[in-house]
Structure formats: structure tokens, C-alpha cells
Image (tube, grey):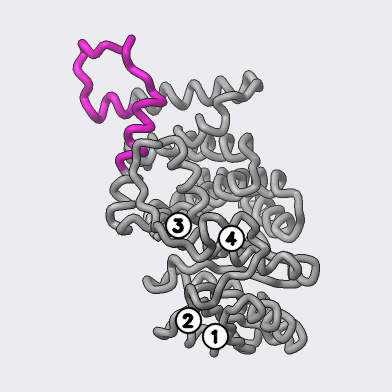
Amino acid sequence: MEAEKAALRAVRTLETGDAVYLLVEALTTHATTLARLRHSAEARSVFERAISVAEEAGDTHGAGVAALSLIEELGSSLSDDELSVVIDRANSSLGESRELATVRRLATNACNVVSVIRTHLEFPPSVDWTEFSFPDAVRRYEAHFIKLALKDARGKITRAARLLRLKGHQSLTSLLKKHPDIPVTRRKRSIISAGDTDVSRHIDPSDRTVRILHVEDDKTVAGIVKEMLEDQGWQVETCVDGNAALEKISGENEYELLLVDYDLPGVNGIELISRARDLDHRCDTPMVVLAGSPVEAAAREAGADVFLQKPKDVSSLVKTIKRLLEEREDEQ
């Protein structure tokens, strides 16, 4: 119990810093202690967060170790499909590792997973293992569920990623690169024309009306941002209160993008993002947190596509929004 509390304190301390790899280690340790206290559901959630945080930060070693720890601590409670997906994520992250101890852990876990799946599927004794490839088998399982998710999401990558419990469309986009045979429908028309390689150019407002909800209680910041965005031909609706913003987001108003601060009267920005992601008509909407507080990890966990720090990142806001809008068009 004391170990769990200590691990949790470490996580909370590191969440406000920039040392992502240390946060991943702390999350993995916290999840392990929870698993050993038999808090399986909570442990799995923290393991998944550790993997996602590591993947988003490019910490492949941390992601792989967290995935291996998930199998070692909770493998008996995972289905064959879940085991296949987790070991594939570990293999993707650690396949080229030169750390002998880590490679041994990967090999041991892979063999255990193969053994479990073989038992459950009742492979015949005469199976030709010389032709068997575990990575290929895992990829087939992975491809199967990606196809199902894309079908149920009607081809929308962001929605499919949520069905697969992935953090953001970027994670699914990365997986799709390993499965070029999976068809992904792209819209021919984009907000940014195919010949427009300079994302700093203005989008012609006659092509499409872009509506943005900006939730910001600082009038100076709200005014600056409104002027910047309206200069692009976009319509900006400003809201100064978190509770009022939640009503707007829950309603039927059309917004192509949500831009929110963190520190707000009423519901804070992280809660707004989280609540919006749970709404069917908002779950695919690009969302940006523009805040002065160091809440990037929490923002991304809640479902924000991008975190920008005030005031230094304000200058990159237009470019960021254009990129998100273009990606949204490509996914639909």
C-alpha cells in the first residue's frame, strides 16, 4: 500500500514537468503496484496511459517496457486478442532493442502469449511451426480489429481510434502504416487545396465556413486570438465561462474546432475536452488546449489533439489549426 502511494506521488509530481520518460517509468511502477494489490481495472488503465504517453513522446523503450509489464502483471485477465495487440505494441517498440535483458523479456512474453493462444485455439499437434510467424499472426489479429473499428466508424479514423481505445487518431494512423492493405477512404476535397503546400497562406473563406469556439476568460488573449483567426476568414465564437461553454458544446451548434484555455470559471478546459470527446457529435472534432498552465499530459489524456503554451505558442496557432482542419478533411 505504501509503495502504491509513493508511486502515485511520483506520478503527480512528474505530470507537471517535462521529463516524460520519468513520468512513463513512474506510471509503469504505479500500475505494477496496483496490479499486485489486485486492483486490476485501475492497473490496466494506468498501464495503457503509460504506453500512450510514451508513444506520443517517442519514448519507444518506455512504451515497450510498459506493454511487457502489462502482460506480466495482468496477462491472465486479458483475452487472446488483447494479448496479441499488447505484445505487438511491445514488439514494435522493442524489436530493435540492444538491451539483452529487455530482449529476453520480450522473447519470454512472446512465447507465453503464443502458448496461451495456441491452447485456446486448440492448434492441432501437426501444425507446421517452421512456417509460423508470431509477428505476422499478431498483425493479422490487429488488422482484423482495425478493419472492424473502421467499418463501425464509417471510415472515420478519429472515431475508429476511440473505438480501439487509442489516444488520438495519430496512434491509429501509425498502426495503419504497418497495414497498407487496409483501405482508408479519403475525401477528395480538402480545406487546403492539394497545390497549396504553404500552410501559412490564407484559406479562402468562400470554400468553406470554418467555425471555431474559443473558450477563454482573459479578454486580452481572447481579442488577440479572435483577430488572428478571423484574419483567416474563420468565424470565431468566444465564450468566457466553462459552464456556458459546456452547454454550447453539448448543443447542436456546428464547430469545426474547439480551442480552450485550462483555467476557466466553472468547468476547466481539461474537463471540457474530456466531456466533448464523449459526445457522438463532437468526438471527431479537432481540439486544442491553449493554456498558460503546464497541463500538457492531462490535456492529451483528456483527448486534446494539440497542447499549446501561452504566450510562446500563440504565434503557431494559425498553422496548427490549418493542419488539424486538413487532417480532419482527409479522415472524413
User: Can residue 37 be seen by looking at this rendering?
Assistant: no
Q: Is residue 111 above or below residue 264?
A: above
Q: Amino acid at mark 3?
A: Asp
Residue of label 1: 245
Of the residues under marks 4 and 2, which one precedes in the sequence? 2
Q: Are marks 3 and 1 in contact (CB under 8 Å)?
A: no
Badge 1 vs badge 4, beta-carbon distance below 8 Å: no
Residue wearing tag 3 = 330
Q: Are circles 3 and 4 on residues that touch, CB within 8 Å?
A: no
Camera-side mark, 3 or 1? 3
- SS at circle 4: helix
Residue depth check, mark 4 versus mark 2: number of the one nearer the observer:
4
Q: Residues under labels 4 and 2: Cα distance?
A: 22 Å
274 or 234, which lies in front?
234
In terms of image quadrants, where is residue 131? top left
Q: Nearer the viewer, residue 248 or 198?
A: 198
Amino acid type of disc 1? Answer: Ala
Q: Nearer the viewer, mark 1 or mark 4?
A: 4
Q: Which mark is residue 83?
A: none
Mark 1 near mark 2, Cβ–Cβ under 8 Å?
yes
Residue 218 drawn at (x, y percent) = 73, 86
Q: Earlier in the sequence, mark 2 or mark 3?
A: 2
State the count of labels: 4
Q: Provide the residue designation for mark 2.
A: 249
Q: Marks 3/4: CA distance?
A: 11 Å
Amino acid residing under circle 2: Ile
Q: Position of residue 20 (x, y in %)?
A: 70, 49
